[in-house]
Image (cartoon, grey):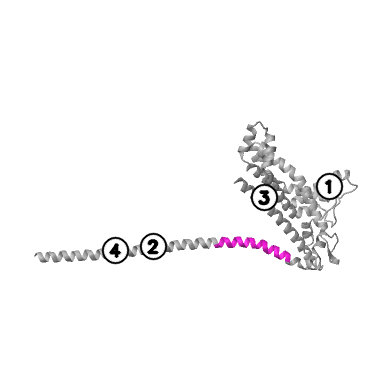
């Protein structure tokens, strides 16, 4: 009886040990499965992350390559003109006779500089004074009311500015302003183009300058006021001095915008290939040259190459001004941090 009982106990013990071994094996496989599953899950997540990273990198490189391809395309199309004439003659010659293959861009470059300079001279003081008032003096309600109205100007199509310039600015210059300075003017002049362009870049300068003023630390204003300075003295000695680089960046961005404006300037400048001797003379900016002639006179040899060279000039000028403004803004951000 005792021996049979011991046999049963030994059998049950052997069964328990076998079950324990099986459970250990099952748990071991469970751990292996969990490790394998977690590793595969992690690998999938890492793979997705790398895929998204590479995709975004590809889109970034694509956007950069578009700019590079535009520059290469313009340069390639300009090669026939560059190979037939020296760069100095193209930039500083005043002779524009397409039928004789004489392409001097100096009148168009000077016309572009006239219109841009006039627009900056008109827009910059008004923009800075407006930005000072809205940032330093105006009540919050006034600022919330006026800023959207100013930003609305940037949403108006350029052709409407051109129509307004033809209907209002050109007759005003011809009948009221030019008569006091010159014997005769049609009103279609670089002054008209400068006035229209000044109104178009007005919102851009104001928005950037206000943002620059807002980045000036409030402690500097409070310290100046606590020392007995007036509001204007604080604005003049503290805010404007601290914001000089930002104002310069706004001017550079406005210049790059003014250089590339086409339709509005084309409608009011007169479009004569001459060097303006005064602000009441007609001019012919580079964007107007491209818009006016591309597609109409392509049968003339070298003419398409000349227009592509004009586009290349605009591209290089705007790229340089944008680069300068970005460098200035980077310096401001680095200094503030």
Q: Give the distance between the C-alpha atoms of the residues marked 1 and 3, in whole angstroms.
A: 40 Å
Say if 263 sits above or below 22 in the image: above
Other-residue count near label 3 (Cα within 10 Å), few / some / many at <14 / 14–19 / ≥20: some
Select label 1 or label 3 by which is in front: 3
Report the magenta stretch's main SS.
Answer: helix
Q: Give the distance between the C-alpha atoms of the residues marked 4 and 3, in whole angstroms.
A: 68 Å
Other-residue count near label 4 (Cα within 10 Å), few / some / many at <14 / 14–19 / ≥20: few
Q: Which mark is residue 35?
A: 2
In the image, what residue occupies the spot 64% across and 61% down? 64
Q: What are the residue bounds of the magenta stretch?
A: 54-75
Expressed as whole percent of the image width and height from the top left, the position of residue 186 reads: 86, 50
According to the picture, the residue beneath numbered tag 1 turns out to be 171
Select label 4 or label 1 by which is in front: 4
Q: Which mark is residue 328?
A: 3
Say if 6 sits above or below 167 in the image: below
Whether residues under marks 4 and 3 lie with C-beta atoms below 8 angstroms apart, the answer is no
Q: Give the distance between the C-alpha atoms of the residues marked 2 and 4, in whole angstroms.
A: 16 Å
State the SS at label 1: helix
In the image, what residue occupies the spot 80% across and 47% down? 169
Q: Give the distance between the C-alpha atoms of the residues marked 1 and 2, in whole angstroms.
A: 83 Å
Residue with the most extreme right position: 183
**Comes first in the chain, label 3 or label 2:** 2
């Amino acid at each position: 009886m005792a021996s049979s009982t011991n046999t049963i106990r030994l059998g049950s013990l052997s069964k328990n040990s076998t079950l324990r071994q099986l459970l250990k094996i099952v748990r071991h496989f469970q751990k292996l499965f969990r490790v394998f599953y977690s590793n595969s899950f992690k690998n999938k997540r890492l793979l997705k992350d790398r895929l998204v990273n590479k995709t975004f990198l590809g889109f970034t490189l694509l956007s950069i390559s578009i700019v590079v391809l535009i520059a290469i395309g313009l340069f390639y199309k300009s090669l026939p003109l560059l190979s037939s004439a020296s760069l100095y003659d193209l930039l500083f010659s005043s002779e524009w006779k397409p039928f004789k293959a004489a392409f001097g861009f100096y009148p168009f470059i000077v016309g572009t500089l006239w219109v841009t300079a006039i627009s900056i001279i008109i827009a910059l003081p008004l923009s800075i004074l407006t930005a000072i008032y809205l940032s330093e003096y105006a009540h919050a309600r006034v600022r919330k009311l006026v800023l959207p109205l100013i930003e609305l100007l940037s949403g108006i199509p350029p052709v409407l500015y051109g129509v307004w310039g033809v209907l209002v600015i050109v007759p005003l210059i011809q009948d009221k302003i030019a008569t006091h300075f010159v014997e005769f003017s049609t009103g279609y002049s670089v002054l008209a183009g400068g006035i229209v362009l000044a109104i178009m870049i007005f919102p851009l300068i104001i928005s950037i300058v206000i943002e620059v003023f807002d980045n000036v630390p409030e402690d500097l204003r409070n310290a100046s006021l606590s020392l007995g300075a007036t509001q204007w003295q604080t604005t003049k000695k503290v805010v404007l001095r601290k914001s000089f680089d930002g104002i310069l960046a706004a001017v550079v961005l406005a210049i790059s915008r003014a250089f590339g404006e086409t339709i509005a300037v084309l409608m009011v400048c007169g479009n004569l290939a001459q060097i303006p001797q005064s602000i009441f003379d007609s001019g012919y900016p580079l964007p107007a040259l491209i818009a006016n002639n591309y597609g109409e006179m392509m049968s003339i040899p070298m003419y398409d190459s000349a227009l592509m060279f004009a586009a290349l000039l605009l591209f290089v000028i705007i790229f340089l001004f944008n680069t300068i403004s970005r460098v200035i803004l980077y310096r401001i951000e680095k200094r503030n941090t």
